[in-house]
Amino acid sequence: MTDWPYPLWIAHRGGGGAAPENTLAALRTGAAAGFRMVEFDVMLSRDGVPVLMHDETLDRTTNGQGNVNSRDCAELERLDAGSRHGAAFAGERIPTLATALDTLLSLGLAANIEIKPAAGFERETGEVAARLVAARWPGTAVPPLLSSFSQVALAAAREEAPGLPRGLLFDDVPDDWPAQLAAHEAVSLHCNEAALDDATLRALRAAGVPVLCYTVNDGVRAQALIAAGVAGLFTDSLELPSRLQG
Ligand code: G3P
Ligand code: MG
């Protein structure tokens, strides 16, 4: 893991809990808090444009209703994705992946792009997201790390842009993780810290696999995972890294 190019701390959904998730304000908030890497989720609009969104439906995070993929990108871009988080963010928009990539570059942020396909759109979402990143990201900057719970999406991303790094994403790490990592030629394994047992983590580390854990908001747990050699911690708590540094 000596040549691992990504920082330890990763702001979850862009700006953790400090900004509306998966917005440009979130990316700016993460960067302003000192993070050098962010994670965000990508899904397709009805007309096939990758946008930043976690849920399949609009209701929780925006003033819209219904499925994300029942609206064209232009309709999604008119929605308010900030007010549900707080009045200070009123008018914040759902960004396209293209705009988010430009913002990452202008802020000097590394990224983990989580491909989050709506059911039935796994292949298309992986293809489109990887194609856009490969076309738009300069070869001189550390490339975004692609990940997905969907192995179909990850395989499609690999076919489309084999040069982009991929991470396998699990809730609970399956016993056959070595075979799955090899099958996807993945560079990292991302998993739920709450489901990760010490023996599995030790085995992953012994195999030299960079392990990234979500979502770590507790200082004691973060310190234990760092001591055990994890490569990345996704957090909603933007003050946690500086708190741990004392
Ligand atoms: O990619 C890590 C983490 O974001 C996965 O969970 O549900 O927050 O996207 P979720
Ligand atoms: Mg995510």
Image: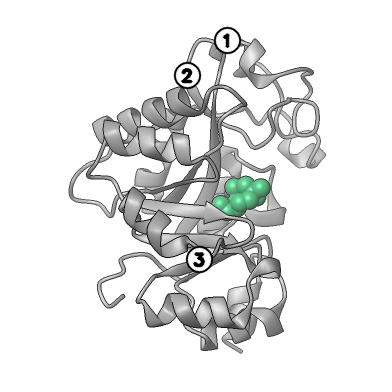
Query: Quadrant location of the C terminus?
Result: bottom right
| Residue 208 visible, this angle | yes
Q: Are marks 1 and 2 in contact (CB under 8 Å)?
A: yes
Residue 102 in the image: x percent, y percent?
37, 36
- Are there few (<14), some (14-19), or many (20+) residues within 10 Å of tag 2? many
- Label 3 CB less than 8 angstroms from ligand 1: yes
Which of the marked residues, 3 or 1, is nearer the chain's N terminus?
1
Residue closer to the observer: 137 or 209: 209
- Are there few (<14), some (14-19), or many (20+) residues within 10 Å of tag 1? some
Residue tagged 1: 72
Q: For the residue marked with disc 2, what is the amino acid?
A: Val
Which of the marked residues, 1 or 2, is nearer the chain's N terminus?
2
C-alpha distance separating marks 3 and 2? 28 Å
Q: For the residue marked with disc 3, what is the amino acid?
A: Leu
Q: Are marks 3 and 1 in contact (CB under 8 Å)?
A: no
Q: For the residue marked with disc 1, what is the amino acid?
A: Asp
Q: Are marks 3 and 2 in contact (CB under 8 Å)?
A: no
Which of the marked residues, 3 or 2, is nearer the chain's N terminus?
2
- Residue found at x 44% / y 26%: 123
Q: Can you say whether 48 is above or below 116 in the image?
A: above
Query: Quadrant location of the N terminus?
Result: bottom left
- Are there few (<14), some (14-19), or many (20+) residues within 10 Å of tag 3? many
Indicate the secondary structure of the residue bearing disc 1. Answer: loop
Q: Quadrant of residue 217?
A: bottom right
Q: Can you say whether 10 is above or below 29 in the image?
A: below
